[in-house]
Amino acid sequence: NSTYKIYTALFGLEDGVITPENTFIAWDGKNYPFDTWNTDQTLPSAMRNSVNWYFQSLNEQLGAPSVNEYIQQLKYGNENMSGDFSSYWMESSLKISPIEQVELLTKLQNNSFGFAPENINAVKDALCLSSSDAGTFYGKTGTGRVNGQDINGWFIGYIETADNTYFFATNISADSDATGGNATEITMSILSDMNIWVSQK
């Protein structure tokens, strides 16, 4: 689901559809279900508000063959893009496991992909949720909705502290209320219990 937007952003940067200096895409004037989507976007705002149309626009400008090549290069999940090109990552053909998510995030953080460092940094900046003396917290939620019910919730990311980097991927599924927000709450509780990260209230 929306955790895949991390990589759509990276592909768009690598292909020059957007650049670290200019990630602006104008709103097309259509009325979307969330107010935050009904305005012009940059990569940080689109990532923060999980703006589907922004990433669909990147995909369209990249084209299916190019996206497919990148997905194979990254070995992203099952590498299956057979679903509709506008939504193949939304409860559709493209699937990934929590362990694969963590493996990919590790490669992203270390830039094992060999992508341009400034492009990796632009994606990291867009994923930064908070930064303090305790460290820097990067993350992205995802919610899978089918027939109006939220059945698949994700929260993935990593925390850089002075002495370590911790990677995580939380995935929850249920008949309803399995949202990225709920996956985030569970994750924050576990990170707090493990004394890895305590939310600044």
Image (tube, rainbow, N blue to C red):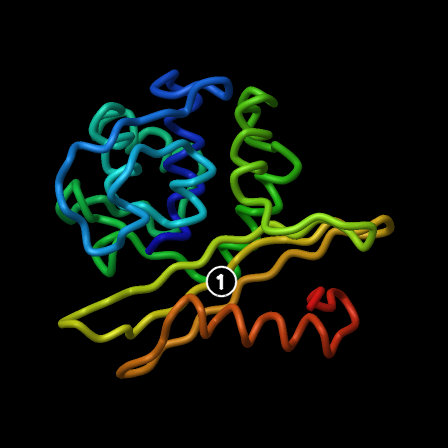
Q: Where residue 177 appears, x then y in whole percent?
A: 33, 79
- Kind of residue sitting beneath label 1: Phe
Q: Position of residue 69 (x, y in %)?
A: 33, 29
Q: Quadrant of the C terminus?
A: bottom right
| Crowd tier of the residue under label 1, counting other residues whose Cα lies within 10 Å: few below 14, some 14–19, many 20 or above | many
- 106 versus 61 height, above or below: below
Does 180 sit left or right of 157 as displayed?
left
Viewer-side residue, 68 vs 154: 154
- Report the front residue among 167 and 187: 187
Residue under label 1, please give it. Answer: 155
Q: Is mark 1 on a helix, strand or loop?
A: strand
Image quadrant of residue 117? top right
Tell me what residue is drawn at x 43 percent, y 44 percent: 47
Q: Is 142 on the left or on the right of 119, as rendered?
A: left
Q: Which residue is drawn at 47% across and 38% down?
A: 44
Q: Residue furthest right?
A: 163
Q: Position of residue 34 (x, y in %)?
A: 26, 54
**Which quarter of the image is occupied by the N terminus?**
bottom left
Residue name at image x 73 percent, y 68 percent: 198
* Identity of the residue drawn at 54% across and 44% down: 127
Where's residue 64, x and y in %? 21, 30
